[in-house]
């Protein structure tokens, strides 16, 4: 089991959700986030003042998937979130030791989806 953490533009949330739906991945957690990447935020003009924005609004999507679903899910997220512009986002993957569905007590891969 793997945890996919995807930080994407807020506008990419619906496309990513729909793309994951299409490959049978429904469970996810969404967190409103702020972040900075290689550009360290960016300088924007606001009321004719140059304003340094340190952190830009992003959405963090956390999805636990089985190992079999990992590559499919990653492909779906990547394709749905890509516009080609700076700040499209970043995705990383970590190992998950255990998942428990509270209602049934199921554990492991059976508890994921
Ligand atoms: N090394 C990192 N660790 C944790 N979060 C990161 C890291 N890099 C980027 N992020 C998160 O991902 C968001 C999107 O990053 P972003 O798409 O700007 O990546 P980038 O590497 O700067 O690529 P690009 O050049 O396309 O902008 C950031 O706002 C931040 O929340
Ligand atoms: Mg960036």
Image (cartoon, helix red, strand yellow):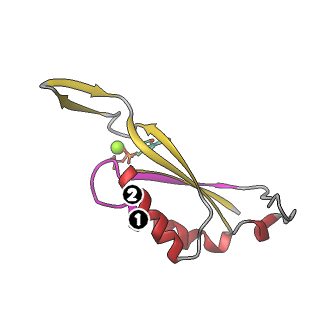
Disc 1 from disc 2: Cα separation: 5 Å
Q: How many callouts does the rendering have?
A: 2
Query: Dot 1 corresponds to which residue?
Result: 15
Name the image quarter holding the N terminus: bottom right
The image quadrant where one finds the C terminus is bottom right
Along the line of sight, the residue nearer the viewer: 81 or 47: 47
Q: Which residues are magenta?
A: 79-95
Left or right placement of residue 38 versus residue 66 in this view: left
Quadrant of the image occupied by residue 80:
bottom left
Residue found 46% across the figure and 71% down from its top: 19
Asked whether mark 1 lies closer than 8 Å to ligand 1, one says no
Tell whether position 88 is magenta: yes
Q: Residues within 10 Å of mark 1 (few under 14, many from 20)?
A: some
Which image quadrant for residue 11? bottom left
Residue 5's tag is none
Question: What residue is disc 2 on?
Answer: 12
Residue 58 in the magenta stretch? The answer is no
In the displayed structure image, the side of residue 49 where residue 65 appears, left or right = right
Element at label 1: helix
Q: Image point 35% across, 61% down: which residue?
A: 82
Ligand 1 appears in which quadrant? top left
Residue at 72% from the left image edge and 66% from the top image edge: 112
- Residue 9 in view (yes/no): no
Confirm or reject: label 2 Cβ below 8 Å from ligand 1. Answer: no
Relative height, residue 109 to residue 9 (above, below): below
Name the residue at the right extreme: 105
């Amino acid at each position: 089991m793997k945890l996919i953490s995807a930080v994407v533009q807020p506008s990419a949330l619906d496309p990513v959700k729909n793309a994951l739906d299409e490959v049978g991945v429904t469970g996810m957690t969404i967190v409103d986030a702020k972040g900075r990447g290689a550009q360290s935020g960016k300088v924007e003009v606001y009321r004719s003042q140059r304003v340094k924005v340190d952190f830009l609004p992003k959405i963090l999507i956390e999805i636990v998937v089985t190992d079999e679903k990992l590559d499919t899910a990653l492909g779906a997220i990547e394709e749905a979130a890509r516009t080609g512009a700076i700040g499209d986002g970043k995705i990383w993957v970590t190992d998950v030791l255990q998942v428990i569905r509270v209602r049934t007590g199921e554990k492991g891969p059976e508890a994921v989806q």
